[in-house]
């Protein structure tokens, strides 16, 4: 990696506090450097409104904004959905899955603009630094990596000092000392950290932090049923209407959000070793995971499904750890997509007071046989079960007999 001062840096720019103050700081740190602010439209809502103007006012020489919603949905969110990856039982990986795409596009922009460096505003304590930098290393090991939070000359060591720096340099920022949540939003989710959320002995202030979903007490008193159509493991329709993946997720966010679906509060284990506490809102993703699970239950054979569930744990780790471009993730994806080739059909999900429950599932490839599953023994050789149980239980029987014959064994 080149250790000389960079001539041109492509910075992952969100318009948030950290990257907003980093732009002027980089100008001071590397006199004469050219800065390209790269912003990715991933479904942040109004957050990117006026972002180019904000970036120029903060010190950017060039601004590149890319609408990546469709690519994000089709090439990142849906492959992860097919894997059914969940980190530590609750986290649907909304921030984790977005970072490799942003970093990959940064590399593209660096090539297009002749930049010799890429940078990010992730701190030295979090997971995002790893996710950005692993992607840089995988796709462009020749580019210099600029990470101000790990620079010993970077004096902004907390959010309060960053706010003061922004005010001093007339940098427009979306937070204040009285609203100190750190939030990350995209098409798949929004995360919240900071303030009382950092304290496991306190309940989050739901009315202040929730953005995509309604607090339970404000949800409808009547349930709603939504139908999701699938083809080869991919959701293709909502209530019979075919939609592009990014529009489908956005629609389910609205539907699930009003019913309070997809709110997770968890203490997770970060890659670098510490524990952190956050609130995650993933309404549409939660509906899709429930629907996909119901489809897999009827379409995938038992042993394959059980093995796929084990694979999902490793897949979730790879995504969480920022190893999207790791050969193992790509290899596991091939297995996952093969298992989902027959996951076609539709399922209905009932939404009520924060819960999404699959209530029906149908598929032309269903392995469910109602005659076999019924209490009727017609057409079923019950005598075969006796021999099966004898052989299946033989190791346990022999082990118990051996224990009984050994001195001192119970």
Image (spheres, rainbow, N blue to C red):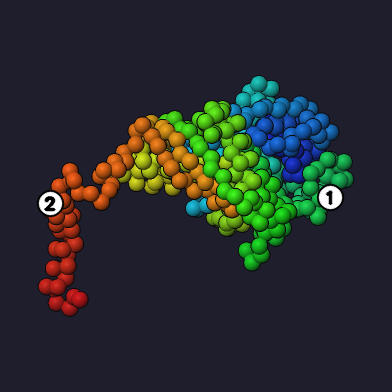
- Residue 282, which numbered label? none
The residues bearing labels 1 and 2 have C-alpha atoms spaced at a distance of 79 Å
Mark before the other along the chain sequence, 1 or 2: 1
Q: Which residue is painted at 12% across and 51% down in the image?
A: 383
Residue 358 relative to residue 385: left or right = right
- Residue 383, which numbered label? 2
Q: Is 196 located above or below residue 245 in the figure?
A: below
Q: Is 341 located above or below residue 267 in the figure?
A: above
Please, what secondary structure does the residue beneath circle 1 have? helix
Q: Which residue is painted at 70% across and 58% down in the image?
A: 205
Question: In the rendering, at what x and y percent does residue 57 appear?
Answer: 84, 33
Which residue is tagged 1? Answer: 164
Quarter of the figure with the N terminus: top right
Disc number lying in front (1 or 2): 2
Residue 282 relative to residue 49: left or right = left
Q: Which residue is painted at 78% across and 53% down in the image?
A: 179
Please, what secondary structure does the residue beneath circle 2 have? helix
Question: In the rendering, at what x and y percent does residue 328 appear?
Answer: 42, 38
- Would you identify the image quadrant in which residue 18 lies? top right
Q: Which residue is painted at 35% across and 43% down in the image?
A: 305
């Amino acid at each position: 990696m080149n250790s000389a001062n960079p001539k041109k840096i492509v910075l992952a720019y969100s318009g948030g506090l950290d990257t907003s103050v980093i732009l002027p700081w980089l100008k001071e740190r590397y006199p004469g450097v050219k800065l390209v602010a790269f912003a990715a439209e991933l479904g942040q809502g109004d957050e990117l409104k006026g972002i180019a103007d904000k970036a120029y006012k903060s010190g950017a020489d060039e601004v590149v904004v890319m609408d990546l919603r469709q690519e994000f949905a089709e090439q990142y969110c849906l492959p992860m959905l097919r894997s059914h990856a969940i980190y530590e039982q609750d986290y649907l990986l909304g921030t984790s899955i977005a970072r490799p795409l942003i970093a990959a596009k940064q590399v593209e922009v660096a090539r297009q603009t002749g930049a010799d460096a890429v940078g990010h505003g992730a701190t030295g304590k979090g997971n995002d630094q790893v996710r950005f930098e692993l992607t840089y290393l995988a796709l462009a090991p020749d580019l210099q990596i600029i990470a101000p939070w790990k620079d010993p000359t970077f004096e902004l060591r907390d959010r309060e000092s960053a706010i003061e720096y922004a005010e001093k340099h007339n940098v427009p920022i979306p937070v204040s000392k009285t609203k100190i949540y750190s939030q990350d939003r995209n098409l798949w989710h929004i995360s919240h950290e900071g303030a009382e959320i950092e304290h496991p002995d306190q309940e989050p202030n739901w009315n202040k932090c929730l953005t995509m979903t309604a607090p339970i007490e404000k949800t409808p008193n009547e349930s709603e049923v939504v139908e999701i159509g699938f083809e080869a493991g991919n959701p293709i329709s909502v209530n019979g209407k075919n939609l592009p993946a990014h529009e489908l997720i956005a629609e389910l966010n609205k539907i699930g959000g009003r019913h309070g679906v997809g709110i997770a509060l968890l203490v997770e284990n970060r890659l670098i070793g510490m524990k952190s506490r956050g609130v995650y809102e993933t309404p549409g993703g939660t509906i899709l995971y429930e629907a996909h699970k119901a489809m897999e239950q009827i379409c995938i054979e038992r042993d394959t499904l059980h093995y796929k569930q084990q694979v999902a744990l490793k897949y979730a780790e790879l995504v969480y750890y920022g190893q999207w471009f790791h050969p193992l993730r790509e290899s596991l994806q091939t297995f996952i997509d093969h298992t989902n080739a027959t996951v076609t059909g539709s399922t209905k999900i009932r939404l009520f007071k924060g819960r999404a429950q699959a209530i029906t599932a149908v598929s032309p490839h269903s392995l469910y046989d109602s005659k076999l599953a019924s209490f009727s023994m017609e057409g079923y050789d019950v005598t075969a079960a006796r021999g099966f149980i004898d052989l299946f239980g033989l190791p346990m029987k022999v082990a118990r007999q051996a224990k009984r014959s050994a001195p001192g064994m119970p």
